[in-house]
Image (cartoon, helix red, strand yellow):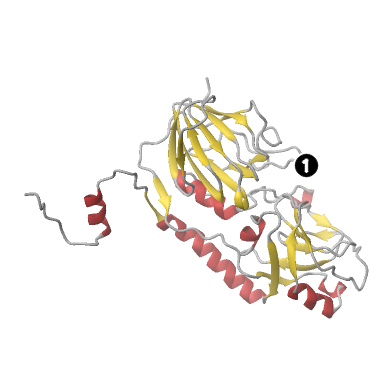
């Protein structure tokens, strides 16, 4: 039998995502990919995968997965959730583990991830990745188009996701000692390509207002509710290109931040664009979160992007060996270089 993860319960919306499907927007093919590429990057690093490898993206409620391989190494990064490893499908209790670390599961064990809090998505990476054929160079799932990922759709109970490895590598487990995904107090934006479709007073009011992530937010767009934005030149334009983080304002005056599954073109005026460095933290906000914006220059946006890329590159340096309960405290203290030596008082 091919090594796999058996989907016992799929969660609310679990898909396979990588960094996205680039180079085909001129053909009308959306990029898709992870809503939170920072958490995807971290989960892959923890299990030893390339940062752009495909992983499971779970929204709101995590999946339950049974191991049908000799063993697997997984890591869960993103929202907070109860993460339990059960001895079997019928088991009610087992051991709990934390996120931001790698962990090994044996054949027959079950990974159960509960409801998500603090963010709307988390990522489950598996060492070696999933044995899935890329579509246009990516395994990202585009549900609307029915392409990529596992049969172009969200996971369903009974699915068996094939793995590239039957066994995990022989190494110690690791964890991340720090992780940066918290949103700034105000999300940074640059002026949008149709900012002139709004009076200056409306642009100022948009930047001075607080909005709420609405219940209809999804992978395509984060629909915000709050103060309505008035147009000065109508709300229809000739369709033009949609960049990640574009903030469209349709006829109802409620802004929409366009995300991973955004359409390639759109016909609503765009008042602003979220800078790329702030988009991952914004995209992971759950329904009900409060959001406000501040305008920055393109130079500032580029500087923020450079800092973001540097933080991603430095993430490898923040991985440390995972210390288990009962580990030799003497050896641990010596490694930390807190003291120069020990004596045996009993002797």
* Residue 339 rendering spot, x and y as whole percentages: 20, 62
* Residue 70 rendering spot, x and y as whole percentages: 44, 26
Total marks shown come to 1
* Residue 90 rendering spot, x and y as whole percentages: 54, 24
Q: What element carries label 1?
A: loop
Q: Residue at x 89, y 71 (%)?
A: 231
Does the image show residue 48?
Answer: no
Q: In this view, does 89 lie above or below 44?
A: above
Among all residues in the image, which is located at the extreme bottom?
201
Q: Which residue is drawn at 74% across and 62% down?
A: 212
The answer to whether 277 appears left or right of 319 in the picture is right
Q: Mark 1 points at which residue?
A: 144
Does the image show residue 280?
Answer: yes
Q: Which residue is drawn at 67% across and 50% down?
A: 22
The answer to whether 254 appears left or right of 155 in the picture is right
Of residue 210 and residue 21, the one placed in the foreground of this image is: 210
Q: Residue at x 62, y 58 (%)?
A: 280
Q: Is residue 244 above or below residue 15?
A: below
Q: Is residue 284 above or below residue 65?
A: below
Of residue 260 and residue 322, the one placed in the foreground of this image is: 322
Among all residues in the image, which is located at the extreme left?
347
| Crowd tier of the residue under label 1, counting other residues whose Cα lies within 10 Å: few below 14, some 14–19, many 20 or above | few
Of residue 172 and residue 266, the one placed in the foreground of this image is: 172
* Residue 267 rendering spot, x and y as whole percentages: 87, 59
The answer to whether 71 appears left or right of 54 in the picture is left
């Amino acid at each position: 039998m091919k090594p796999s993860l058996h989907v016992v319960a799929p969660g609310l919306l679990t898909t396979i995502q990588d960094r996205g499907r680039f180079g085909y927007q001129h053909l009308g093919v959306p990029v898709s990919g992870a809503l939170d590429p920072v958490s995807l990057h971290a989960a892959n690093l923890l299990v030893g995968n390339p940062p752009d490898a495909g992983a499971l993206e779970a929204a709101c409620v995590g999946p339950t997965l049974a191991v049908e391989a000799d063993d697997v190494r997984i890591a869960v990064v993103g929202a907070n959730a109860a993460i339990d490893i059960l001895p079997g499908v019928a088991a009610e209790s087992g051991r709990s583990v934390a996120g931001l670390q790698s962990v090994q599961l044996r054949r027959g064990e079950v990974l159960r991830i509960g409801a998500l809090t603090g963010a709307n998505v988390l990522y489950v990476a598996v060492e070696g990745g999933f044995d899935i054929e890329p579509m246009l160079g990516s395994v990202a799932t585009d549900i609307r188009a029915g392409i990529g990922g596992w049969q172009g759709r969200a996971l369903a109970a009974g699915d068996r996701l094939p793995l590239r490895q039957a066994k995990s590598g022989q190494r110690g487990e690791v964890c991340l000692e720090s992780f940066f995904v918290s949103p700034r107090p105000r999300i940074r934006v640059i002026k949008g390509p149709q900012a002139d479709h709004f009076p200056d007073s409306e642009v100022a009011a948009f930047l001075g207002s607080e909005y709420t992530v609405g219940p209809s937010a999804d992978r395509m767009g984060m629909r915000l509710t709050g103060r309505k934005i008035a147009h000065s030149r109508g709300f229809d334009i000739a369709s033009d290109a949609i960049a990640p983080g574009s903030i469209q304002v349709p006829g109802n005056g409620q802004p929409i931040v366009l995300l991973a599954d955004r359409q390639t073109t759109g016909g609503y005026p765009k008042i602003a664009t979220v800078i790329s460095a702030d988009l991952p933290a914004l995209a992971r906000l759950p329904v009900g979160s409060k959001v406000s914006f501040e305008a920055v220059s393109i130079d500032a946006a580029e500087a923020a992007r450079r800092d973001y890329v540097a933080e991603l590159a430095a993430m490898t340096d923040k991985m440390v060996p995972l210390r288990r309960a009962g580990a030799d405290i003497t050896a641990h203290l010596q490694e930390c270089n807190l003291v120069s030596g020990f004596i045996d008082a009993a002797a």
